Image (cartoon, rainbow, N blue to C red):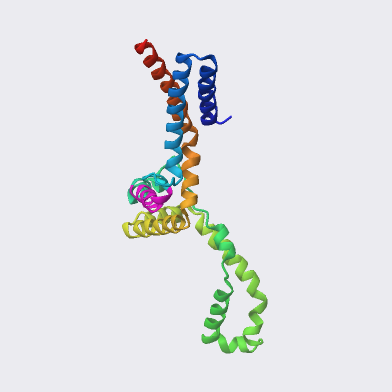
Amino acid sequence: MNKSILTNAIALILLILGMVLESPIVTTVGVFALSGAVTNWLAVYMLFEKVPLLYGSGVIPLRFEEFKAGIRELMMTQFFTEQNIARFLNSDNQQIKVDLAPVLEKVDLEPTFDSLVEVINASSFGSMLGMFGGADALTPLKQPFVQKMKESLIAISQDERFLNLLSDQLEQPSVMHDVQQKIESIVEQRLNELTPEMVKDIIQTMIKKHLGWLVVWGGVFGGLIGLAAVLLVA
């Protein structure tokens, strides 16, 4: 059962029980416990929902623009700094290996073959090639050429020296700045997709469990204060 509901229910039962038994002590404990639990429950509720005539209620949805700006500032100044990005790329523990094979597999290398044919036609071999059917004579070589080129490029991209050169290039200040700008753009775009309702749900999910204890302890301390008040008066 929800902790807030359970605490309020117990406090209300104590109040009713005290009134039925005509016990001032139980009644006072119930009143104070119920007031403490309800007050804290209302405070938690007011964080997320607007309550008419209660100034400051619904503060999280109303301030969602500031919330988004705070997230962006935190991510870009604490996590995605140029130093942190460089440290991550250079970390031996991460053992980052850039695998370009999937990208190279999708690259269309046919224009490369077409350019090669144009170079041959423009060279002194062009006239000789014309004796064997011209550029069309090279068409059967297109697919084998493309496949071989892809295999060669993949092999080069997996070479340790190439990876070291790529890593060195990524460490350049201008490149690192561009990477940070790209990350900032992605973060900004994602945050712009947030709505007040989404912001409320995010925060509510994170802290609802812990805020529930405010209601519990509000009821407990309220009851203890009520008991102390009765004993002091007596």
Residue 94 versus residue 133 in the image, above or below = above
Pick the quarter of the image with the N terminus: top right
Residue 148 falls in which quadrant of the image? bottom right
Pick the quarter of the image with the C terminus: top left
Q: Which residue: 50% across, 23% down?
A: 11
- Nearest the viewer among 35 and 220 is 35
Span shown in magenta: 61-77
Picture coordinates of residue 45 (x, y %)? 46, 39
- Magenta stretch mostly in which secondary structure? helix
Q: Is residue 62 magenta?
A: yes
Q: Going by the image, does 27 lie left or right of 85?
A: right
Q: Going by the image, does 55 lie left or right of 45?
A: left
Q: Is residue 100 magenta?
A: no
Residue 161 versus residue 147 in the image, above or below = above
Q: Going by the image, does 20 lie left or right of 76?
A: right
- Nearest the viewer among 62 and 67 is 62
